[in-house]
Amino acid sequence: MRRPITLYGLTFSLPLLIWQVLFFVFPLLFLVALSFWTVKNFVMSPDFDTVNWTTMYGRAVFWQAYGNTLALAAAAAVLTSIFAFPASYAIAFKMSDTARRWAVFLMVIPFFTSYLVRIYSWQIFLSDNGIINVILGWIGLGPFQMLNTVGATMIGYLTLAFPLVVLLQLFSLVFIDRTLIEAAHNMRCGRLRTVFEVVIPSARTGLVIAALFCFILAFGDFVSPVYLGGGEPTTLSILITDTTKSGQQWPRAAVIALTMIGTLMVVAFAAVKFAYKGKSK
């Protein structure tokens, strides 16, 4: 039964509504309008011309950057989820309440520092004369090129999203009905099989949402692809900066940004639908 809309409820929801309108709806509408403006002699003019859409969608570099961004974000979501699961599983099932609180606190600490600073610190480790290559040189290996590679970009994505993914997975794992795990063990189900057939399906919603957040963060990230990946391969965030520097083409950059927003909305709706598939209403 649907609850009636009351003045009391509207009053308390009004700040959230105003916030969404001012900081999401209005900027989004402005971005849509901007994508139809034209640029002549480095000056933007309000217009309604589809030239920016046809120009960007007609360029092979745009679709190449789109594919790169999609692939990198998907890989980051999968790898981060895989690496984070053992940590979140151990915190949820192997630690005491006190240790679990400390573990959550340690997962929050990275957010106290700038993401850019953390990425710069990785350059010290991954450069040709960095800490890792120096250590490898002691045993007669290297130097290996680790900076300005896809692998370095992926490390940046892990740095960005790993703590958040662990926390989101943890919040889902701690609410799993422990009697289901005990029942699986009573039926002589091994620990690994229990994880895959009981724990993961029971925590599917949280695991999918955690992977979704990682995908969103990686899809729009600019810092890691530039400062760790060296700008190769080109991603949509890099393409936006290149476009704005090329003749002040802000309307074409708006096309790229809207494409990114549309993609993220489609992925988010699909992920949420899968996460809650089969859940009772």
Image (cartoon, rainbow, N blue to C red):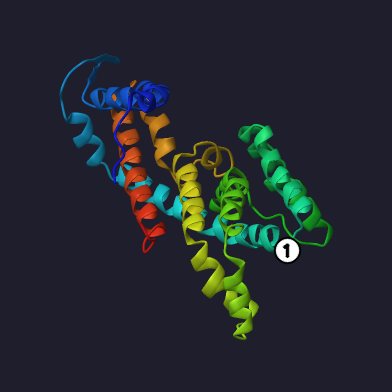
Residue 246 visible in this rendered orientation of the protein: no
Q: Which amino acid does label 1 sit on?
A: Lys
SS of the residue at dot 1?
loop
Residue 128 horizontal/vertical position (percent): 69, 47
Residue 97 as seen in the image, left or right of residue 251: right
Q: Which quadrant would residue 90 be assigned to in this image?
A: bottom right
Residue 100 as seen in the image, left or right of residue 78: right
Q: Which quadrant would residue 195 be assigned to in this image?
A: bottom right
Residue 61 horizontal/vertical position (percent): 33, 43
Would you place residue 181 above or below residue 262 in this image? below
Residue 267 as seen in the image, left or right of residue 167: left
Please name whichever residue, 70 or 97, is drawn nearer the observer in this view of the structure. Answer: 97
Please name whichever residue, 27 or 196, is drawn nearer the observer in this view of the structure. Answer: 196
Residue 180 horizontal/vertical position (percent): 57, 72
- Residue shown at 22% from the left, 30% from the top: 52
- Residue shown at 23% from the left, 23% from the top: 33
Residue 120 horizontal/vertical position (percent): 66, 36
- As drawn, the residue found furthest toward the bottom would be 188
Would you place residue 76 above or below residue 204 in this image? above
Would you place residue 164 above or below residue 55 in this image? below
Category of crowding for the residue at label 1, using alpha-carbon neighbours closer than 10 angstroms: few (below 14), some (14–19), many (at least 20): few
Residue 281 visible in this rendered orientation of the protein: yes
Please name whichever residue, 133 or 77, is drawn nearer the observer in this view of the structure. Answer: 77
- As drawn, the residue found furthest toward the right would be 138
Q: Mark 1 points at which residue?
A: 94
Image quarter (top left, top right, bottom left or bottom right) of the C terminus: bottom left
Q: How many marks?
A: 1
